[in-house]
Amino acid sequence: MELKKVKEKKEEQADLLPLLKTCWTIGLQNWHWFLLSVIVCLGLGFLYLQSKPRVYQRQAVMLIEDSQGGSMNGPMPRSRTRSNMTSLLELNGVSVGDNLKNEIFILGSKRLMNIVVEKLNLDVDYTTDESLHYISLYGKERPFEVLFQDSVARMAYSFKIQKTGASSVKLFDSKDQEENTYPDMSLQLGQMKKTPLGTFCIVRAPKFDKWKEEIITVTRLPREKAATRFMSEIKASEYDKETSLIVISCNDVNRRRADDLLTTLYNTYKEDVVENKNRVALNTAKFIDERIALIGEELSKVENQLAGFKKQNQLIDFQQTASQVLGQTTKAHELSLQLETELNVARYLGTYIQNHSNDHDLIPALNIGDAGFNTQISRYNELMNQRNSMIANSSEQTTVVRELDRQLSQMRQSILASVKSYIQSIQLQLQDARLNERLLSGKISSAPEQEKQGLDIQRQQSLKEALYTYLLNKREEVALQQAINEANVRLVEGPIGDLKVSPRGTIIMAFALIIGLCIPSLILWIIYMFDTTVHNRKEIEEATTIPLLGEVPHIKNTDSTTLISELPSDDPVVEAFRIMRFNLGFIRQHPKVFVCTSTTPGQGKSFVSRNMGIILAMAKKKVIIIDADIRKRNLSSHFGHNSGLTTYLADEYSKLEEMIIPDGIAKGVDFMPAGSVPPNPSELLMSERLETLVEQLREQYDYIIFDSTPMFSVADANIVSRLVDTTLYVMRAGVQPRAFLPELERIYQSGRMKNLVLILNDVNFKKGRYNTGYGYGYGYGYGASYSYERSGNHTRRAKNLLSRLKPGKN
């Protein structure tokens, strides 16, 4: 089994090697086409590089710090101090670690980019042509600036400006996004001009005096479109998984603009972070102010009630009457006040959380309870800010927002549970404090009723005063926190780098080189695959068992009149005919009469017929060549003799010797012209006088060669073949269709053509399969023709090869 696999592998390699050799040969033979294609493609690649503006990449690195001001370098970067509440949230599936992906999303959001575009006026672009590409003018590079009356463009439009004087310019080629054009106009610098595109004026910049006649194109986009354009140039990504560094890169044709984009984007992001933090403080301050107003009203009512009570009972200070008892109950009373204050705040906070209208609002940070409870509220507010920021740039239906809503809902329920637990704890403490206070109050039961009523009113006053004072203190704390809020982000490394990201010259030129090699390779391979003609001996031997008499090499700059007698004796063509003359001796019965035919015109049968006669005459043999192509009379046209074969066949009184003329080129070769064209060529060739002619010529000549018509065009060759000893079937390499070879094999096996042998003409041994050669004008009126070409003409050769790819041109 293994030996079989090894054998199959060797057979595959053996089949592959000739194919690779053929491809290599084809490449070497057509090196000039490869060179031309590579030069053209490299030239096009160079022009492409020159037509594209240079795009450079600038980068900045920013650090997201934790709440203590340090860098974040762990899986939970902003929560180094953990509380019981934090652990509880994580057990509930709520992530408390900061997600850098959220910050990256915000950095690339359209909301921030809109602000950047507005700050830098990036909705207006100034460009000018330089060589084959444009350059973008930014900042101080511009010789002027266009000031628009409307702050935002409703649609995109552009116009061109050219300097016409020391303080005047020309505005032309104005058009909007719908390709509507507007008339040209002249403007003075500083003049507010109303145009169909809008009202604006053009002001001088420092480089105006150096501006010559360059045309500058001004393009204005709606801010949303400008933001979308520059969003595609900005990319934010994590530096690595172990740090909280974010790398922001900007690809732009202008490096200064890229630097300003990165710097302004960082500053805008930083301001956004501070604004989010201040939003928590503002919401808390609003809550405190509402409570202060409410408690203030209640405190005013209690104070008015106390003043009226004293006035009615004519009391100045009833505390003296119960000083001893009050001294004993002071601590219990203060504890009750503190617990009641915390209970009221906790209840209000619980009511605020339970109110679903506040589900998307921040929870006031009142700093009640333990540190874990306050950390829980702080984390909730941070997530709520992130959610609201994302909604500003997308929809509530996005996966990220839904995930945040789920986390916020869980945290809200957890906070509410903590509030309820805290309220229950305070209520228990308050019950104990009030019980102790009632025990102490029982000791003063014997005091006058006025003192008891006054003490109750004063206690209400103290409670309201304590709560009022607490809220005032909280408001000051919130105001202080708002004043010192800052973003937990800093720029580690400003815009750096000069990496050219586009166009990539090396890649483009390499691609152009590959294309330059692929184009001719593909064309030649298609020609190779679609070439259905015979080119060499191997293709004939694989398809037929017909003997191959010989191969005639390709001759440059030849036609059908080329004779081997005119060539040097050591010429390959002469040697080829000598070999065929030698091979004739191995044909059975030593043939003397030959008919030379082919599949279609243009195969070179007349060339072979005449030169075969010459090569036989060189061996001291007497040869006669008969032009049996009585329809086209190709050979006879070179002699200008009107009498010939048809004259002899049609006129039984004509004399044979009058129809034969010397060839005039080679000694020992005679020629019988075709004669005049008869109305019935086939019937004439079927007459008995043709048999008589052959018998007479056999006695006078050593060899008789009929140059007949193509076999598959008309019946003449088949008619003449009945009288001959051997049929010389000429096939021209690169012209003879391979599809005819099976038919020739059937003719050979049937014996319809006597002693059929093949001659492969015009074989280009240097070019393997791809070869052409001489041709000559030979066209029958019955559907087949072959046009003249010379092998030295590469253009005609290419057209000929390509024409064979078309349907019906096989």
Image (cartoon, rainbow, N blue to C red):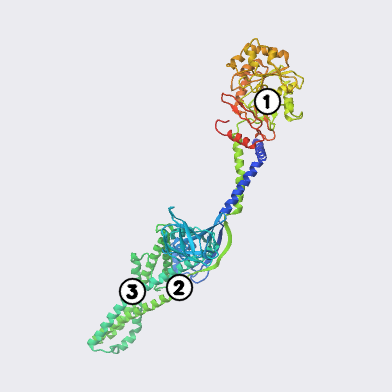
Callout 1 crowding tier (Cα within 10 Å): few <14, some 14–19, many ≥20:
many
Position of 449 with respect to 335 (left or right) is: left
Q: What number of labels is visible?
A: 3
Report helix, strand or loop for mark 3.
Answer: helix
Q: Quadrant of residue 634?
A: top right
Q: Nearer the viewer, residue 493 or 250?
A: 250
Q: Is residue 243 left or right of residue 285?
A: right
Checking the image for residue 485, the label placed there is 2
Residue at x 41%, y 76% (from the top left corner): 479
Disc 2 residue type? Asn
Q: Nearer the viewer, residue 480 or 539?
A: 539
* Up-down relation of residue 550 to residue 267 (above or below): above
Residue type at the position of mark 1: Phe
User: Which amino acid type is marked by label 3?
Assistant: Glu
Residue 715: percent from left, percent from top? 59, 19
- Residue at the spot x=55%, y=32% of the render? 807
Residue 607, numbered label: 1
Please state the horizontal and vertical placement of residue 241, each as a whole percent of the image. 54, 62
Kindly identify which residue carries mark 3: 290
Residue 689 lies, with reference to residue 290, above or below; the image says: above
For mark 1, give the secondary structure. Answer: helix
Q: Position of residue 159 (x, y in %)?
A: 47, 57
Which of the marked residues, 2 or 3, is nearer the chain's N terminus? 3
